[in-house]
Image (cartoon, rainbow, N blue to C red):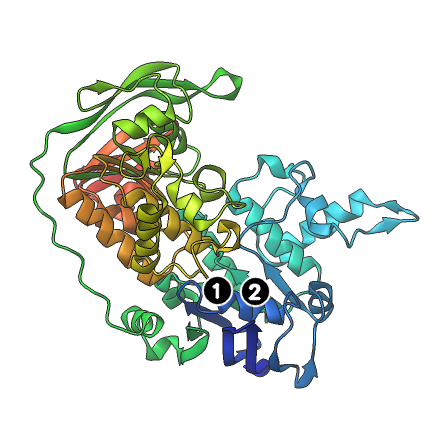
C-alpha cells in the first residue's frame, strides 16, 4: 500500500490550551487506520483540521505528496476527503436518494433529474455492497440506515479518504457487524478509512494500523499484528487498568416492582405489552434488546417522563404510579437518560447548573428556597475531578463540552446522590475506556452498597459483565430472562431477534 496522506507536526491551540501538540499521522491507500484515545485526547480536533473545519496553528498536511491547505469542508471534499460525523446530517422528509445527491444533484435542463438520482444511487449501493432502499423516506430509516446514507453521500461526492467519527456509538450489534463488513469492503476497493473510536475490540477486528493519542500527543503507532486490546488501553490511559471491584453477593429484598405495564404508541399499537419485572436491593438487572422494542419507553414510564396507560410502579412500599418526575426523584430514583441532550442536560446552562438539575430541592443543597452554593460547588468540583471531566471551569457552558464529557457530567450527577434506585440507560455511550472503567466501577460500588439498578445498554458485553440478571425485550414484551452465568452474546442475540433459548442451545422461531 502506497502513502496517500501525511500529517506532520500538526498543532492546534485554543488560547493557552493545546488540543493537538506536534501530531504526525500517515494513511496509506486501501488502509483502515484507527485513531484511538480518551475523550479530549485530540482525535476529533485532528480530523477537523484535515477536513477543513479547523485551521492548524502550525504543521503540514500532504496529500498525494503535495502540501495542501483546506479552508472549508467543501475544499476537503473537492480533494477527495469525506467525513461521516457522529451526529448525522440528514433531512427526514427527503428520500434516501435525495439525501445522498443533495448539493450535487443531477439536472435535466434546469430541473432536478429525480430518476437519474435514483439510478445513480442504486448503482452506488451495488458497487459498494451497501444495502438500503433508495426510495424510502429518511424519517422511516433506522439509525444504521441513516449512517449508510452518510457513507453513500461521501462516496457519491468522490471521496477516496473517508473519516468515520465514533461510527458504532449508536448502532445495534447487528448494525456494527454490517458496518465493519462495509469498512473492510471499501478498503478492498482502494478506499482509505480513518476510524475514530475508543472501542478496542472493533479496532482489533477491522484496523490495519492504529495511532493512539493521549493529551493531544501521539502516544504510539502500531500495526494490529503487533498489539492487543490491553496494550492499546494502557497507551490510551497511560497506566494499567484497575481490576473491577469484587461483587458482594446480593441478599436484598425486591425494591422496584413493575406490574402489567401497558403503553400505546402511534396507531394504537402497544409499545409496552404487559411488562412486569422486579429489581432487588443490591442487584443490577440488565435489559437487552434491539433499539425500538420498548426499552426506552419502559425507562421513561418508570422515571415519570411518560405516563403509562395501565399497570403499577412501586419503589419499596411506595406506589409511584401517576407521580411526577420530581416526586419520583424525591422517592429515591436517579436516572441516567438515554438521550443526554434531550433529557439529561441544558446546553445553554453552566456545568454547575447542569450538575444541580433535579436535585436543587434536596435539603443538603437548599434551605428555605435558597441554594447552598458553596456546598454544592464543592460537590461539583469533586465530580469533575473524580470523572476527569475536561472543562475550563464549572462555569463553562455544558454545550461546549464534548459528548463524552457531557455524558460523564450526567453520570456523575446521578451517581453523586445517595439514591436507593438507579435507571441507567446507555451509561457509557460515547465515553472513552478510562471513563468507562470509572463508570462501571461506580455502578458495581452502588450495587454493593445496596442500591437497585436497572441497566439498558446496546453493548451486549457491557450488559453481560455488569448484570446479575438479564431480561430481553422484543416487540414491547419481556421474552426471556438469563442469569449472569447463563448469558452469552449468542443467546441474547437470538432472544433479541424473537428466537428462543433452551439450555445451552438456541433455536429460532419461525
Residue under the image location 22 percent in, 54 percent down: 441
The correct choice, above or below, for 16 with respect to 280 in the image is: below
Task: Give the farthest residue toward the right.
Answer: 109
Residue 253 position, x and y percent, is 10, 29
Residue under the image location 34 percent in, 32 percent down: 361
Residue 138 position, x and y percent, is 62, 39
Which picture quadrant has residue 82? bottom right
Using the numbered discs, state the Cα–Cα distance from disc 2 to disc 1 in whole angstroms.
8 Å
Residue 28 position, x and y percent, is 55, 79
Which picture quadrant has residue 307? top left
Residue under the image location 35 percent in, 37 percent down: 289
Q: Which numbered disc covers residue 196? A: 1
The correct choice, above or below, for 312 with respect to 88 in the image is: above
The mark nearer the N terminus, 2 or 1, is: 2
Residue 461 position, x and y percent, is 29, 51
The residue indicated by pointer 2 is 163
Residue under the image location 50 percent in, 45 percent down: 349
Residue 509 seen by the camera = no
Location of the N terminus by quadrant is: bottom right
Number of numbered discs overlaid on the protein picture: 2
Of 16 and 483, which appears nearest the observer? 16
The correct choice, above or below, for 131 with respect to 328 in the image is: below
Secondary structure state at the residue bearing disc 2: strand
Which picture quadrant has residue 38? bottom left
Task: Give the farthest residue toward the bottom.
Answer: 65
Marks 2 and 1 close (CB-CB < 8 Å): yes
Task: Give the farthest residue toward the top.
Answer: 310
Residue 446 seen by the camera = yes
Location of the C terminus by quadrant is: top left
Of 389 and 16, which appears nearest the observer? 16
Of 377 and 5, which appears nearest the observer? 377
Secondary structure state at the residue bearing disc 1: strand
Amino acid at each position: 500500500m502506497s502513502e496517500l496522506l501525511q500529517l506532520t507536526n500538526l498543532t492546534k491551540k485554543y488560547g493557552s490550551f493545546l488540543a493537538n501538540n506536534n501530531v504526525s499521522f500517515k494513511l496509506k491507500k486501501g488502509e483502515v487506520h484507527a485513531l484511538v484515545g480518551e475523550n479530549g485526547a485530540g482525535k476529533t480536533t485532528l480530523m477537523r483540521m484535515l477536513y477543513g473545519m479547523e485551521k492548524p496553528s502550525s504543521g503540514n498536511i500532504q496529500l498525494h505528496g503535495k502540501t495542501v491547505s483546506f479552508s472549508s469542508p467543501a475544499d476537503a471534499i473537492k480533494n477527495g476527503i469525506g467525513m461521516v460525523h457522529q451526529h448525522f446530517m440528514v433531512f427526514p422528509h427527503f428520500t434516501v436518494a435525495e439525501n445522498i445527491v443533495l448539493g450535487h444533484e443531477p439536472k435535466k435542463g434546469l430541473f432536478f433529474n429525480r430518476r437519474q438520482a435514483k439510478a445513480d444511487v442504486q448503482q452506488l449501493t451495488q458497487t459498494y455492497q451497501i444495502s438500503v432502499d433508495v426510495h424510502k423516506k429518511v424519517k422511516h430509516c433506522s439509525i444504521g440506515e441513516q449512517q449508510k446514507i452518510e457513507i453513500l453521500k461521501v462516496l457519491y461526492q468522490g471521496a477516496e479518504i473517508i473519516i468515520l467519527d465514533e461510527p458504532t456509538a449508536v448502532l445495534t450489534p447487528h448494525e456494527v457487524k454490517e458496518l465493519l463488513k462495509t469498512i473492510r469492503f471499501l478498503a478492498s476497493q482502494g478506499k482509505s478509512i480513518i476510524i475514530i473510536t475508543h472501542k478496542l475490540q472493533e479496532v482489533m477486528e477491522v484496523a490495519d494500523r492504529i495511532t493512539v493519542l493521549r493529551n493531544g500527543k501521539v502516544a504510539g503507532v502500531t500495526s494490529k499484528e503487533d498489539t492487543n486490546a490491553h496494550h492499546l488501553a494502557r497507551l490510551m490511559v497511560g497506566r494499567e487498568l484497575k481490576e473491577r471491584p469484587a461483587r458482594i453477593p446480593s441478599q436484598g429484598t425486591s425494591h422496584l416492582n413493575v406490574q402489567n405495564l401497558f403503553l400505546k404508541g402511534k396507531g394504537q399499537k402497544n409499545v409496552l405489552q404487559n411488562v412486569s419485572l422486579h429489581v432487588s436491593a443490591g442487584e443490577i438487572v440488565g435489559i437487552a434488546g434491539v433499539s425500538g422494542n420498548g426499552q426506552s419507553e419502559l425507562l421513561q414510564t418508570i422515571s415519570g417522563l411518560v405516563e403509562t396507560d395501565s399497570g403499577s410502579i412501586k419503589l419499596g412500599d411506595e406506589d409511584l404510579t401517576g407521580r411526577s418526575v420530581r416526586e419520583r426523584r424525591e422517592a429515591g430514583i436517579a436516572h441516567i437518560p438515554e438521550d443526554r441532550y434531550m433529557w439529561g442536560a441544558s446546553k445553554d446552562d453552566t456545568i454547575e447548573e447542569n450538575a444541580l438539575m433535579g436535585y436543587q430541592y434536596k435539603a443538603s443543597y437548599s434551605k428555605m428556597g435558597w441554594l447552598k452554593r458553596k456546598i454544592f460547588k464543592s460537590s461539583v468540583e469533586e465530580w469533575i475531578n473524580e470523572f476527569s471531566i475536561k472543562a475550563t471551569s464549572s462555569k463553562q457552558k455544558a454545550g461546549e463540552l464534548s459528548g463524552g464529557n457531557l455524558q460523564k457530567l450526567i453520570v456523575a450527577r446521578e451517581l453523586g446522590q445517595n439514591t436507593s434506585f438507579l435507571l441507567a440507560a446507555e451509561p457509557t455511550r460515547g465515553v472513552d475506556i478510562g471513563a468507562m472503567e470509572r463508570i462501571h466501577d461506580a455502578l458495581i460500588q452502588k450495587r454493593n452498597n445496596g442500591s437497585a439498578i436497572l441497566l439498558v445498554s446496546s453493548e451486549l458485553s457491557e450488559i453481560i459483565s455488569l448484570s446479575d440478571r438479564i431480561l430481553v425485550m422484543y416487540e414491547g414484551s419481556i421474552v426471556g430472562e438469563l442469569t449472569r452465568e447463563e448469558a452469552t452474546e449468542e443467546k441474547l442475540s437470538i432472544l433479541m431477534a424473537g428466537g428462543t433459548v433452551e439450555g445451552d442451545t438456541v433455536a429460532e422461531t419461525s
